[in-house]
Amino acid sequence: MKDQLYQYTLQLGDNAMILGHRLSELCGHGPTLETDIALTNISLDLFGQVRNYFQYAASLKGEEKSEDDLAFLRYPHQYKNVLLVEQPNTDFAHVIVRQFFFDAYHLPLLKQLCESNDEQLKAIAQKGIKEVSYHLRFSSTWMKRLGDGTEESHARMQAAVNHLWPYVGEFFMPTQEEEEMQGYGIGPDLAVLKAEYDETIRQVLAESTLVLPEIIGSQKGGKTGIHSEHMGFILADLQYMQRTYPNMNW
Amino acid sequence: MMVATSLKHIEALLRELSDPEIPVLSIMDMGVVRKVEVEGQKVQVTLTPTYSGCPAMDVMGDDIINKLKEEGFDAKVNLVLSPAWTTDWITENGRQKLEEYGIAAPLEEQADKLALLGEGRLVRCTNCGSTNTRMISQFGSTACKALFKCDDCLEPFDYFKCLK
């Protein structure tokens, strides 16, 4: 049970970390100053949550592991994040759609974790949910503004939706850890989560004048450590300092 | 008697420390200090972060340890997440300091939502006092603030977002 909880906590942290890293790549490169600041602030919120998860995971693991070991010294197949969050910042439309697809999942996830039987995950969720409800507000606003915007912005948003939607299904394919955590009342009920997710997507896409593509299956693998080619590049960037100068500190 | 005196003394010392990103606001007025326990020269300070990723928290923790060390105390800082910090814990004195510094203090939850969604002009300009203001950016210079602009005096200013 302790090991399952450890793995589950890593998965929660990894999603926030890899998305946070993707957003941090935009620091100084946002399309306008305001969106640059907004995206990096969201990144910062996610990294704060990552630290909370990894500190907890490290304490579960013992063996003198630290949050930095978990962030910087694992190999690609040991990261449990979904494929969606590792997808690149192709253009601002992709950044916003990826964010919206994630926020729409993240908020109801934390809502359920606020009722978790695990006290620490509950505390982390109660802290993070206030931040995440703000993230969803931000990404939803941009979905509508750009989807229902100009011909160009609409076309780009629709292209991003078409590209990223096949990655969403993975959220709702439970791993063994997720099933066990649900059984213990620690993790969420994915069916309830999905119902709320679908409703948010339906409402916001309708207002954004965007439609979901017909797909025959979902991309999957990230949760079990089978990642897309992007993951290696992300980690090369993210782990560089710690690998080159082991145990370095700020 | 001793204990009460040293607790007061320590609280006074903590009042001299501020959030590095909002230097006018002491950490006591900010409401991030949840508990202070004193036992002889040993002090345990319990802090709660404003936002999960607030980079100022580590600095505040170090500042507390250093400040108390100067006064001969051996301090430890303990971070707790629950109950989660809310802007309601900013003291009245703190709110006044914020306004004087040019950061509009948080509104109540409902009004905050309207202001941030652009559905109501409710945030008072810290420069001229007009409420004829609008949001420029949901995120300001730090995670806890949004950027506003006054349509009367035309000055931009920060608004400390309501967090509940």
Image (spheres, helix red, strand yellow):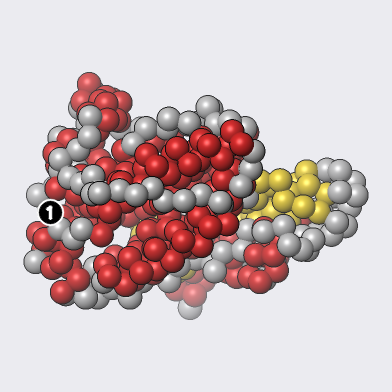
What residue is rendered at 34% in x and 36% in y?
Answer: A87
Q: Is residue A77 above or below residue B129?
A: above
Question: Image check: B127 left or right of B24?
Answer: right
Question: Image check: A120 left or right of A150?
Answer: left
Q: Position of residue B122 (x, y in %)?
A: 78, 63
Question: Image check: B151 left or right of A184?
Answer: right
Depth order, front residue of A206/A177: A206
Q: Chain of mark 1?
A: A
Label 1 crowd bin: few (<14), some (14–19), many (20+), radius 10 Å: few
**Residue picked out by circle 1:** A62
What residue is rendered at 71% in x and 46% in y?
Answer: B136
Can residue A134 be seen from the camera position used here? no
Depth order, front residue of A81/B145: A81
* Label tally: 1
Q: Position of residue B91 (x, y in %)?
A: 64, 68
What residue is rendered at 54% in x and 48% in y?
Answer: A143
Depth order, front residue of A30/A9: A30
